Image: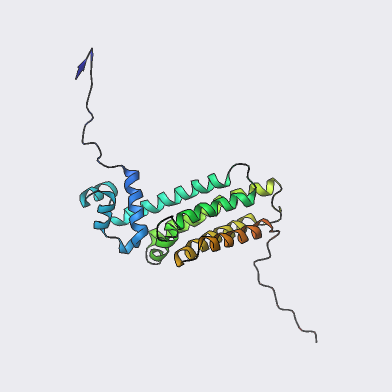
Amino acid sequence: MHNGTKTEKRPRGRPRAYDAGEAVANATEAFWQGGYSGTSLDDLSVATGMNRPSLYGAFGDKHALYLDTLDGYIDAGFKGMEAALGGDLPLAQGLMRVYDAALAIYLPAGSEPRGCFLIGTAVVEAKRDADVRAKLATGLKTFDRAFEQRLLRAQSQGELDPAADAAVLARVASAILHSLALRSRAGDTRATLRATAAAGVALICAASAAPSAEPAKPRRKAK
């Protein structure tokens, strides 16, 4: 098209007929419902609205697409945790914001309990798949890091005993998250799960120096 002295050039090649982010999100839902092994390429085609050649062209094979969904879930989870733990809220309230947000995901309104995507799908595959095992480890460490950053800030602000081991407490906070994920899928009620989370938060906020990881040595009997 001629317009004055300039000619508009059309971009070469076909425009993408799909949104990559939306396709990964839809694939995540499919894997979440059926698990990795139980989700077929036909299931993924239906979920994403893309035929097999398009799926292969965009993401590679099913395995590569699954790894992409794990990356997306981990990234979104970390950003969500940073947002929940940020700001000027007290530590206890920040931790409960994380757990409340998690429960909203694990127990979606009007749907069956689905738990955590990472825990619910990757744990099964990690035993035989090194790539999935690496993603699982990365995800767990990423969530630990989000908790640890907030705990260190709590120590610097006088909310938490400076003698407490922030790294250990972060793993405890993550363990609570994992428990909520598993128990939500097992049928525990939201009220029960939230009470569990609140009890865990109370323990974390009351923590002092962590006990030694070394087992206590038995005392010698007096002769």
Position of the C terminus, as image quadrant, is bottom right
Can you say whether 19 is above or below 162 in the image?
above
Q: Residue furthest top?
A: 4
Along the line of sight, the residue nearer the viewer: 56 or 82: 82
Position of the N terminus, as image quadrant, is top left
* Residue 139 x/y as whole percent: 47, 55
* Residue 54 x/y as whole percent: 23, 47
Along the line of sight, the residue nearer the viewer: 122 or 180: 180
Q: Residue at x 40, y 54 (%)?
A: 70
Quarter of the view holding residue 194: bottom right
Q: Residue at x 40, y 67 (%)?
A: 127
Q: Residue furthest left?
A: 1
Along the line of sight, the residue nearer the viewer: 119 or 12: 119
Q: Residue at x 68, y 62 (%)?
A: 210
Residue 180 falls left or right of residue 45 = right
* Residue 160 x/y as whole percent: 69, 52
Q: Residue furthest right?
A: 223
Res 34 visible: yes
Q: Residue furthest front?
A: 110
* Residue 165 x/y as whole percent: 65, 57
